[in-house]
Amino acid sequence: MVLGNYKNCVCARAADPAILSASQDGGIVTQLFAFALEEGIIDGAVVAGQGDEPYKPEPVVATTVAELMEARGTRYTICPNVSMIKEATRSYGLDKVGIVGTPCQIQAVRKAQLYPMGMRSVGSKVALAIGIFCMENFSYQGLEAMVEDLCNVKMESASKMDIGKGKFSVYTARGAVSQIPLKLTNKFEQPGCKVCLDYVANLADVSTGSVGSPDGWSTVFVRTKAGETLWGKAIEAGYFETQSIEDVKPGLGLVTKLATDKITKNQKNLDERASFGVGKGLRNPYI
Amino acid sequence: MGLLSDLMEKIFPKNKPVDPKAAPGPVTVPEPAAVPKPAAVPEPGTVPESRPEAKPAVKPGDVKVEKKPEIIETEEKPVAEKITIGHVHMSGCTGCLVSLADNYEGLFTLLDNYADLNYCLTLADVRDIPKMDVALVEGSVCINDPHSVADIKKTRENATIVVALGSCAAYGNITRFSRGGQWNQPQHESYLPIGDLIDVDVYLPACPPSPESIKNVAVMAYLLLRGTDEQKELAAAYLKPLMDLAKRGTEACGCDLMFDVINQGLCMGCGTCVATCPVRAITMVYGKPNIDSDLCIKCGACYAQCPRSFFNFDVMNQFEAIGEAIDAAMGKGDE
Ligand SMILES: Cc1cc2nc3c(=O)[nH]c(=O)nc-3n(C[C@H](O)[C@H](O)[C@H](O)COP(=O)(O)OP(=O)(O)OC[C@H]3O[C@@H](n4cnc5c(N)ncnc54)[C@H](O)[C@@H]3O)c2cc1C
Ligand code: SF4
Ligand code: SF4
Ligand code: SF4
């Protein structure tokens, strides 16, 4: 269960070089939304828009490919995408909504569908939920501390940030790269992540991340019937290049290891929360 | 309390509150497989073959044959028997009832196949609160009105499962703000959530709870009372967090997000609460919800909808199958 239910897993990247030019990894999210938009499978998607300050994303409802392109790339800070999910069906009047989110955000979407108390006419309109792998996330102030204090790069100079191979890396437009080991960034992890039991967005229609695949490629889990139908169509239409996940390095083994590590660590945190005080514990949302 | 609690005891005997002093057990990767896969809900009186199969738009290979509804043995009388549901109107605006009705054809499917609405002052001509399996109580209780007080007690007496339908019944909601003085009963000023007067089994908060959420709870209540053992187990697992909400208390506020989510180190900034709030009292500040207390009507929907108030993996991991099963029960999935 550490990797969730899935129908198939591949290594893939977008066929369109224009998407890859500024996507975080294989451009899976942007390419799949763009395809779904063109096919009429979604009318728009909630994505992490650029926001007013550098690397401080705001959720936006993208209804054009241009808007999807604007939102490419990972911002390692909270972007409350689910806050726009009802709005997408109301002010924007969308009947078929796409949403991208971290595993916890996809969990929120599924709860909104199964227990839709305050989510009238939302659940049935979620046509495509794309999950992105996630080890942890940071508050904006935490990210600023990592980038400006530890990496010594101004937020506005950064052209890309990435987490991989045990390091947090910041790239600038002028070609500088600044890296710090993840053990320095750990303390900035937002508290809510310490109880998170999902690494690869187990409840998404399709989930994707860089781990397991070579640079510039993505690992993709196709999970639900809706996801499978869409992915099949996109492959048929030539929107993605793929390789067998068995043929690439480091492959699924690393994904499984990281997922197991995360879940084990956070399950331990949950257990410790139960006896956090003296005869008093902290709340466990899962029981 | 009612049958539901007894059932829960049988189904979740292990689910005793965690002893905080107990040493943390060995670390295990959670393997939430306790609940059986939902078989399609049987439609009483229908032969499976006559039922429309899943969407043809989906590749035929996707349609899992084993998802076919189980054939109902005619001797298994209880499966075909409808449950009785009553709508008890306390001090509420009828918005919750309208929300139930807003299931449109779904409401008819519900009433045709699963439930008889045997009490509902707005829609049916029955004066006295009868015996019923499920009472959907809308509105809070005006304790200045002896009729209301008598009715809520009668409801508890006559219903196996009492559901607080909507935020007024569960938490008081806007009736908390009552100061009386309304024509033509100006002396009616004190309103209490039903849970302050009777034991409540299931909470379904929100103002109003969405039609879909009422439908889901109705279907699950049917499965709990009339389903196969497996269906009962699924229904009990589904309803458990809503029963826990009923035990949690009768006060709600946007502040619950601070007290029980952020302060507890559980908020991860998904923004669900923002989308949930009916009065837009919540905005995200520094990646966490900020509540405008002047706007908050104390409906409790934000907390209930928050994935960090409750998240039951045993049910959620099967979201696709459960969604399909409910759709099949409601005759959907064929359009
Ligand atoms: C906080 C965080 C932690 C991550 N940790 C890992 C990890 O440990 N391992 C791993 O393999 N992958 C991780 N990822 C995912 C990875 O960084 C890429 O986002 C993913 O591979 C998608 O790349 P892409 O090229 O397919 O997407 P792109 O085409 O570049 O699109 C990315 C999409 O994600 C959206 N997005 C960007 N930032 C956020 C955000 N903060 N919240 C919600 N949506 C956002 C964008 O709007 C865009 O639509 C993480 C992502 C985030 C946001
Ligand atoms: S670690 Fe979990 S809780 Fe934190 S942002 Fe990622 S998915 Fe959400
Ligand atoms: S819904 Fe819960 S976890 Fe999500 S932002 Fe609101 S309080 Fe935080
Ligand atoms: S903040 Fe909004 S959703 Fe939460 S209790 Fe108040 S009114 Fe209800």
Image (cartoon, coloured by chain):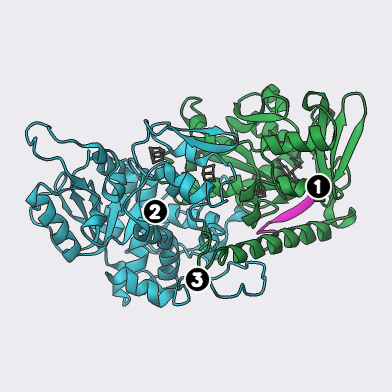
Q: Amino acid at mark 2?
A: Asn
Say if A227 sits above or below A67 in the image: below
In the rendered image, residues at marks 3 and 2 fall on the same chain: yes
* Residue A261, disc: none
Q: Are marks 3 and 2 in contact (CB under 8 Å)?
A: no
What is the CA distance from the residue labelled 2 to the residue labelled 1?
A: 46 Å
- Direction front: furthest residue: A278
Q: Residue at x 35, y 50 (%)?
A: B214
Q: Amino acid at mark 1?
A: Leu
Say if A68 sits above or below A114 in the image: above
Foreground mark, 2 or 1, reads: 1
Chain B shade in the render: cyan
* Residue B18, disc: 3
* Residue B216, disc: 2
Looking at the rendering, the stretch of residues picked out in magenta corresponds to: A3-10
- Judged left or right of residue B152, residue A177 is right
- Judged left or right of residue B86, residue B144 is left
Chain A shade in the render: green
Element on which disc 1 rests: helix
Residue B34 shows in this picture: yes
Q: Chain of mark 3?
A: B
